[in-house]
Image: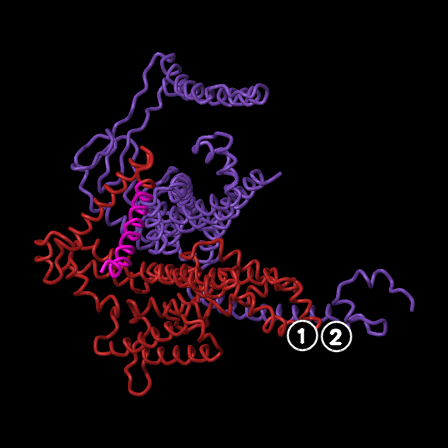
Amino acid sequence: MPALPPEIIASNVADIVAPTPSMPRFHRSDPRTRRLIYQGAFFLVLLAAGFYFGSNAAANIARRGLELGFAFLGRTANFAIGETIISYSPADSYGRALLVGAANTLMVAIVGCVLTTVLGVALGILRLSTNPLLARLVGTYVELGRNIPLLLQLFFWYSLVTRLGGARDAWSPLPGVFVSNRGLRAPTIVANDAFAYALGALVLAIVLCVIVKRWAELRQAATGKRPPVLAVMLAVLGGLPILGGLASGGSLALDYPQLQGFNFTGGMALSPEFVALLTGLTLYTTAFVTEIVRTGIQAVPHGQWEASRALGLSSGRIMRLVILPQAMRVIIPPLTSQYLNLTKNSSLAVAIGYPDLISISGTVINQTGQALEVIFIFMAIYLAISLATSAGMNLLNNRLGLR
Amino acid sequence: MSAVFAPSTMITSTFAVRLRVRALGLAKVLFGTWLNGAITIICIALVGWLCWHAYVWAWRDAAFSGNSTQCRAAGGACWAFIRAKLAFTIYGVYPFEERWRAAIAMAIFAAMIGISFVPRFWHARLLAMWIVALALAFMLLRGGIAELEIVPMRNWSGMIVTIWLAVLSLAFSYPVGLALALGRTSELTLIRYLSIGWIETVRGVPLISILFVASIVFPLFMPEGLEVDNLVRAQVAFTAFGSAYLAEVFRAGLQAIPAGQYEAASALGLGYWRTMLLIVMPQALKLVIPPQVNTFIAIFKDTTLILVIGVFDFLGAIKAMLSDTDWLGFATEAYVFAAAIYFVICSGMSAYSKYLERELSPEKNR
């Protein structure tokens, strides 16, 4: 029996079953041909469905007198937006209005992700506390947060914020910070010369810190002793900006919120909608992140704790230097999907009246009737944000992974 | 005499010893170090403060009956408000004389859901029963047969809509999700890329935007003169949404099946569909039951979002009863009540998922 030619040995099972030399290339029992037929049939069905719905849409659009195209983006919007982080007036275009919405969505998403990460890591560690009372308390919060719909939580926080006292009897947890049914007001730093000098000095301090840290690492590697980095870094970070501010000859000034009539002027203002949305989103997502951090820490083998203790590390340093860096590898993929969830969930803003991308898109659709185009735009923006977040987190994950 | 008492004293003493050891252990855990002691005291103070205020608000000063004036006089929670509106949260604006129909439909759903929770009943017959139950519930709710008055879908509201939407979303999402998962793992390039594109697009955008599409764009693609009810549009949106998420859960299950299973099936001469239906699916679906339940919980919580396109579900009824001028200013009571209902349902499902995980993998616990 002659040996099989190598190309037949190398080919996969599907190819061995079908073509014998006597069979023509496109015979119907050739699996490759069958695949082509199935896909062709599927494609035709899809095409027919597309044509049917497309012609319906074309007829409906013609009947309603709509005009497809993105020309409306340049027209004047003529509606006001309650709060914007990039400048906007009703005289601006629809395109600008949508941009404002996207910026507002990004603002909530970024602030929310940062707060959620900080709170989630802290609570995830506390959830594993040896103190059963503390662990149970955090556990109760996690269960409540995860099992109540976010929309309901948002309604609750919004009703709570709007039922606070008016500006005249605002609650002031810190001097200069006021919480009332007008939202949150906090002092801001006035951008004068002293501020510019201090900012410059801060940048310098950060650069110095990086250098000091690097030097300390080299020193530790060479001598086995670690120079007191933390104290030096704190001194540099705190001292240099103050020196910089003094060197400018001026003084730093704070813009305090002032009560005028029924509202505050000056300082930084966060609207009640923003405060409610941020609180709700953060507390909801943190419940999930807490569990992710907990499982991440538990995934680190127990021997790591014991080995670190044997080396004489304190429990804070064990967590920071040994456990968390390893737990990060388990934590980051699910954390990424929580960031994406938070970003997508920020669209619930529409229910409490914060002008996010979806809520502004709704207004634009109502005014222009260009539903298809606007929906295309906001879906593209959300997909872009999702893809960018995933790409960034994948990069981080690859850097933290085992090498 | 002493012989009679001896065992009893022994039991008492071992019990006492055990109690002492327990108490000592607990004391060590709670107050072992200065930091731990401080944490314990802060926690006790916090829990005590919360419990005391909850007790005063929800029980001691609460009004369980009466009208809004009596409620305000009581100073605490106004449970009388919830009592007055309870039927409204369940039936919404469903016609008053026809409520018995909705009640029977809900009872059918409750019975079916109860049966479906028991793994012993998971059988093809259960599927058939569900189809009959859904048809029966639909006919009862909508009417139009056997001299039942027609109640159009836009009048369905309250808890009925929440349950209806949750059940139907799952019922439709399940087969579509399976098809998408098979498509994504298929060897047919065109079908694979279309499935990936669909799944990733739906998962990449917020549910609200899909609801928007369903409520605004969907009618645009329908033939002229065909009016599609808002609730049906919402169902289309939830099917698209749920199926994309379930497809990823199923895919995880499909990928967990060893290649040897496919090869063995193919050696037995089974084709694609028989391999999938008889060999792969039964194992894959069982593997991913816990994440399936978690997806169900997420979809159930997300049914609240239909409020945004103007369908009146349980949360919609809660929102609506807040604007009753006879009962202004009791939002917290209403939200706490709604939260309690959702919490019980969702944490019940999640406890069930943990039970299933134990039940279905006895080998792990032995």
- Circle nearer the viewer, 1 or 2: 1
In the picture, the disc for residue B270 is 1
Residue B41 in the figure: left or right of residue B229: left
Name the residue furthest bottom. Answer: B146
Q: Amino acid at mark 1?
A: Leu
Q: Is residue B16 magenta?
A: yes
How packed is label 2: few (under 14 Cα within 10 Å), some, or many (20 or more)?
Answer: few
Disc 2 designates what residue? A29
Name the residue furthest right. Answer: A2
Residue B212 locus on image (x, y percent)? 41, 59
Q: Chain of mark 1?
A: B
Q: Which image quarter: residue B26?
A: top left
Q: Nearer the viewer, residue B294 or A346?
A: B294
**Residue A336 visible within the image:** yes
- The range drawn in magenta is B1-27
Residue A182 locus on image (x, y percent)? 23, 41
Q: Amino acid at mark 2?
A: Ser
